[in-house]
Structures are given as C-alpha cells and as structure tokens.
Amino acid sequence: MATPPKEMMEALKCPSCKAPLSVSPDDAVITCSFCGFTATIEGERIANHFILPPTCNAAEVREKVQTWVGRGGKAMVTEAGLRFVPYWVESMGASTQYEGYRQTHETEYYTDSKGQRQSKTITLYEPVRGAFSEDPSVNVLCRRGAAFYSQGALDKALQVSKKSVIPFDFKQITAVESKPLFLNSELTDPDAYEIAETMVSEEHRRRAEGTATKIWDCNTQIQKTGSYLLHVPHWLVRYRFGNETYRVGLDGFTKNVLKGEVPVSAGFRGLMFVVSILGLVIGTIGAYMTAQYLAAQELEYVAYAVVVLGAILAGVGTWQRFKISSEKHE
Amino acid sequence: MTTLKCTQCGGAVEASPDDAIVTCGYCGTSFMPDGQTFKNHFALKVNYTETEALDTLKAYLVKVPGVAEDLAAQISLKGMTMTYYPYWVFTVQGSVTYQGRDQKARFRNPRGNRYTAIDWEWVPEAGRQEQTRQIRLYAGPPARDEIRDYPIAARSRRYFNLKEAKEHTANILFSKVSEAAAADQATAATRAMVYNRINRETSKVENASEDFKVTDRAYVHVPIYSVQFTVGGGGKVYEAAIDASNGRVLFTKIPRTTSFKVGTTVTAVVWFGLAALGALIAIGWILPEYFYAGIGLVAVSAVLAILTLVFGFRRVTAEVER
C-alpha cells in the first residue's frame, strides 16, 4: 500500500475541476464526485477505467423492491442509496503442473492351499501427473475488510455482467444520479494483482488436489496480461414493514435483487411449528411402524434412520421458527 | 492512577500504570508514558446520532421473536454513553525464502498402469512465499467478546478529532498494548500464516531467511454507544452496544414479553416430559412393545426441548453484517 504524506492528502483538490476531494487515509485511488476524474493519490490518472452503466434511478428501485417484497404492497421503502463500488479486474495467464498419486482399493479373490476361495483387499497407487492452463480475469474488491450487505452476490453477478463494461463515462452516470457516490479504491493495481495472484494459485492448487489422493509437487506460473479499474453500481435499500426495518441489495446494472431480507410472517412460524410436530410424528409412529414392517428382515437400522429423520425435521422446524429474518435471492 | 503531562499542551492526563498510549483530554494529542508523541492516531467518524442509533436498535430488536410489537413505545432509556474503543490495525508484509526437503514417492511393483507399493524418498525443495496481511488487534481494557472481536478493518478512518469526541461526551479508552507489542503480535500472526503455506509445500524446512516488515500501522478509535434500557416499566435493565459509525448493533440483550416466556417455558416442559416418557418406553418400564416409538420419542423430543431452550431463551443477539 502506498504511503503518501497523509496530512497533505486531506486537503486535496481535484486536479481536473478543482473541487475539494473527500479522502480517507486508506484511499489509494480517488474518484472526484463532481467530474469523475480518477487518479491515484500520487496524482497519476487512471486511464483504464471502466464502468457498468447504472440502468435504473431511485424511483424505479423503490418500485422494484416494493414489488419484490410483495406482501400486499405494505412495505415502505425508507432509504435507497446508490454507490459505485470499485473493483480491479486483473487478467493473467496461469499454468500449473502437478504430480502426485491416486490411491484405490481393489478386492482380489484367490484360492488358498486348502482349496477355499478367499478374498483380500489390496491398495493400488496410480501416478497422477498433469498440467492445465487458463487465462483468468479476477475481480478484486478494492475495500479492505469492508464487507457490505449482498457483496458476495454482487461479486458473483459481476462474473457475467463484466462482459458489458464500457469506458468510464461520467455523463451516463449523472443521467441517473446527479450526485453520484464513488467509493474510493483502497488498493493500488499492484496490491490487487497480488491478491488476484494468490487467489488463482490457491484455486489451481485446490483443482490439482481434487484429482489425486496426495499431490507432492504443484507449480503455478502466473503472468499478468492486463488490468482495469471498474466501478459497479450497487443500491442499498432499506424498507419498513410494520415496525421493522429490513434491507435489500440491488445490482444497479442488471436491476436484480442480489440478496434481501424478508419479514418472517406469523404464518411461516406456524408452519415451522407444524414441521416440528411432523418430525415428532415421523420419529415415533413412523419408527414404530417401520420396525413392525421390517422386523422380519432384521433391518432395525432403517427404524433408527426414521428416528434421525424425525429429529432433523424437528430441529430444522424449531430453528426456522425462532429465526429473526429470512433471506431471499432473485 | 498516575498523572502524566501532555507532551503538547502540558495538560494533566489521568492514566493507569498499564496504559501504553494515552490521549490528552485538552488538545487531543496522543503520547506514550515515556513522553513520545504518537502521530498515527485515527478514529472512525460518528455517523449516527443518539436518536438514529436508538432507532436502529429498536428496528432490529422488534424483529426478534418474542419481543413486543410495540417495543418502540415501551422502551425507556436509562442511560446512553459513547465510548471510543482502541484498536491497532497493522499491515505486515512478509517474505520467506526457504530450503528444505520434501517427500516424493517412487512407485514399485507395477500392475497395469498402477502400482502396489510406494517408497518415499527425500528430495531437496526450495521456494519463496510472500504475503501481505492486515491484522487487527483490540487494545483496550477487558471488554465483551463482541467488542474484542469486532472486525473494524480500516473502513474510512480519519485522523482522531478530539472535538468530535467531546461533542458526544465520549469516554476515550486508552491502549494497554504498546505499538511495539502490537507490531510483534501482528508480525507473529502473519508469520504463522506464511509458514502455514510453506508447510504445505515442504515437509521439512531446513533453512529459511525471513523478512517481515510492517508497512502500515494505525491506532484507531471506534466510537460505540452503550445503551441501558428498561421495557414497559419493568425493573430489569437491558444493555446493548451500537457502532456509532455505521449503526450496526454489536450486541443487545433481548427483552421478551412475559407471555412469550411463559409460552416457551410451557412448550419446553412439554418436550422434556415427552422425552422422559420416551426414555421410560425405551428402557422397557412401560409399553415395552413400543420400543422403537420410545426411541423416536426420546430423541425427537430432546432435540425439540433443547433447541426451544437455546433459541427461545437466548439472551443476547447481534447483527451479523451491515
């Protein structure tokens, strides 16, 4: 991480439009919210800056969330905020060579000295040697440890939607939101590349380990091929239902609800109580009847399995009945 | 308690003997008891007023099963104070170049494309591991786990501003951990992570040259509201803590209605009763011919009883993410 003269930084002005910049000591790349100019804190302009264009405004988001929650339209959106979340997209060529063995067991039949047929289990080792290569492009969220609601789902959605990135265009943003809020990047390009490199080599190692019982040699070579800074529109919405507040994360590009909390209704809690009782019925009467029916075949363990099934149903029912809120994805 | 003299303004600062960094209540300067001024002092911004923080708490609590629907009207505030909790946030860069030995298999006794035996031989192995980690440490006096383990990270910290703390009449807690001790802990944690990786690659490290350096250090104060409240004129005082920078409910005791408590108790007693009945059947004291039903009854009812107690009487809850 770059360490600039921190006292100076807080009074920074945008080199392009001279508007004051709000900067925190952790920021490495800053975007001016008045003109969109983006540069490192050392003042070096970021040329490869892209964006997923925002496709909906606050009114549309409110309506969308209201419809999504359903419940007779009784949800009241109290807050809908658009933020542009920064990612570094790091492209690289990665190739891995690995070596190890896969262990298998086989049963062998033979006839012993007394002419009896016998069986024994033998262990077999198969050498595993392989190589694979790919050109991954990894999205690295540029906020250290600052997870926000529905971030995981946004990361995932980005894998698909990043095909639609366009060069950063401030006008297209202000058409939707006149005062856009850009989260500054806390990572420089090299910081992000280091993270991406680790992620890829870990992933390759896992993939190699998946092919064998033991891998004793796994070598990954990675070459950086390119990178760009990407701002992704994300809406965080809060709504009231009765006296309660719930939140929803919405993808500002695809307009999809990424993840959202929905109220747990009294009906749902009631249903879950019924599930618990059902578990009790299955675990007792079901187990008894199973045992009666299967006694002849001496398959008692089936009866025990029915008991376990009943206990699981009862457990899940009770857990769900007391939970605070539900989560729903689109 | 000892009295220290501020390195900047000369004001008196009351400190306990084990404080490693203290902050002057007159000018906001942070310094060590040996008289050295400390510069990298940050604080998270107070974004939630008392009223807003209380609203977040109420909106969260009312979702918890067993809490009165009209909780907002029933709460009476007994006290609300702000405390600045101290944390260290270190970025440590570590690199280790190592030589050692690794086990490699040699196959014996072929059978088709497989082998029935393996010999292990030691082969030399060398490599390099590099990692950069951000390590966070709680530095204050003993506190609840929710505060100790709070993942504050470095989100938009700013330089410590005494004026802001004073506006909220915040109590500023001092660090018990010196910068050097915190750096040691952070380095040790990073070192463990690097060696964890190396040990996956190499069975035996024989020679290693290490380089660990702290690339960024910050002493960060996090403003947290602690709230005491009673509900519906009852005498029981409930506590909660809310992050004043993002409104997250760090933890709260749950004020449940009497009718919910009675209902849950009755249900739990019924489940325990059924479990006891099931046990009697299972050991053959009564209705021995229903052995499997007895086993089922004791197992399922025990699950119901225990989970009802765990979830229905959980006393503390916390918001997971915000």
Image (cartoon, grey):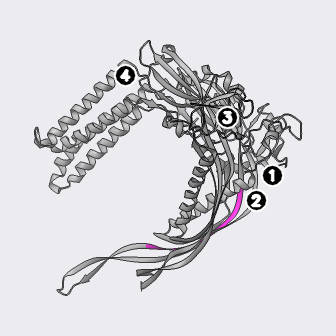
Residue to which mark 2 is pinned: A226
**Secondary structure that dominates the magenta span:** strand
Asked whether B144 or A33 is in front, the reply is B144
B155 magenta-colored = no
Marks 2 and 3 in Cβ contact (< 8 Å): no
Which of the chains bears the disc numbered 2? A
The numbered dot on residue B158 is none
Q: Which residues are magenta?
A: A90-102
Labelled pair 1, 4 in contact (Cβ < 8 Å): no
As measured in the structure, the alpha-carbon distance from the residue carrying label 2 to the one carrying label 1 is: 10 Å
Q: Are marks 4 and 3 in contact (CB under 8 Å)?
A: no
Circles 3 and 1 on the same subunit: no
Instruction: Give the distance between the C-alpha atoms of the residues marked 2 and 3, in whole angstroms.
Output: 36 Å
C-beta proximity under 8 Å, tags 2 and 1: yes
Q: What numbered label is drawn on residue A48? A: 1
Spot occupied by residue A3 in the image (x, y as percentages of width and height): 76, 48
Q: Mark 1 or mark 2, which is nearer the start of the sequence?
A: 1
Of all chains, the one bearing label 1 is: A
Mark 4 = which residue? B260
Q: What amino acid type is highlighted by mark number 1?
A: Asn
Q: Quadrant of the C terminus of chain B?
A: top right
Q: Which mark is residue B43?
A: 3
Residue type for callout 4: Phe
Report the Cα–Cα distance between label 3 and label 1: 33 Å
